[in-house]
Image (cartoon, coloured by chain):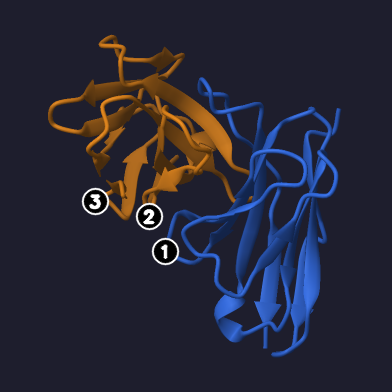
Amino acid sequence: NAGVTQTPKFRVLKTGQSMTLLCAQDMNHEYMYWYRQDPGMGLRLIHYSVGEGTTAKGEVPDGYNVSRLKKQNFLLGLESAAPSQTSVYFCASSYTRATYNEQFFGPGTRLTVL
Amino acid sequence: AQTVTQSQPEMSVQEAETVTLSCTYDTSESNYYLFWYKQPPSRQMILVIRQEAYKQQNATENRFSVNFQKAAKSFSLKISDSQLGDTAMYFCAFIYSGGGADGLTFGKGTHLIIQP
């Protein structure tokens, strides 16, 4: 049981390049989330998904797109990377929100945009 | 929208001492959950303790306990007999327990340093 995994762990991009971050969970969780963490800040929600084929915007969605084609995977895309997107990105998952279930976090991806 | 405020950017205590981290929040909701997460240098987010707003009893987990004051919207974390391994960033977080699936709202964190 690997829990929540993220690929890649580190990445350096040039402004304008695109990339996709992959989050995978093997706990059969319904809900998945993407957060970003900037220096001196807590995590902020980018997008989330309540199930396969569904996505929704969080607090800071601009510049990102997401897809949840399979229940176990949640992809975060940057179509045209900007230096402001330099951050550490965390994926998380949980069973449901009907009653609270703990969010399990991945190890994070450090992205630098030059 | 809810907000979470941690007013102590950094704290430093000696090993074995007791330390309290403060957190206040603002919400119009009555049903919610509060959490403390630990983030060591490895970056991994680790759940330390959680509190259901409808419960009056303060949550405890071994050396970690909270002081939950719902009327004051305050949620502090007490670490007893602090250990070197407690050195980390600590984040207070909030989530509604009602409908919807919006994620956690985090404070900016407190960097806790345990000195030998």
Q: Position of residue B36 (x, y in %)?
A: 43, 34
Chain to which mark 2 belongs: B
User: Badge 1: few (under 14), some or many (20 or more) residues near its Cα, within 10 Å?
Assistant: few
* Residue B47 seen in the current view: yes
The colour one sees for chain A in the rendered image is blue
The residue that label 3 is drawn on is B7
Helix, strand or loop for disc 3 = loop
The orange-tinted chain is: B
The residue sitting at 39% across, 14% down in the picture is B60
Task: Tell me which amino acid carries mark 3.
Answer: Ser
Chain to which mark 3 belongs: B
Task: Tell me which amino acid carries mark 1.
Answer: Gly
Distance of mark 3 from mark 1, alpha carbons?
12 Å
Distance of mark 1 from mark 2, alpha carbons?
6 Å
The residue that label 2 is drawn on is B108
Task: Tell me which amino acid carries mark 2.
Answer: Lys
User: Badge 2: few (under 14), some or many (20 or more) residues near its Cα, within 10 Å?
Assistant: many
Helix, strand or loop for disc 2 = loop
* Residue A34 seen in the current view: no
The residue sitting at 46% across, 15% down in the picture is B61
The residue that label 1 is drawn on is A40
The residue sitting at 85% across, 44% down in the picture is A70
Give residue B74's quadrant in the image: top left
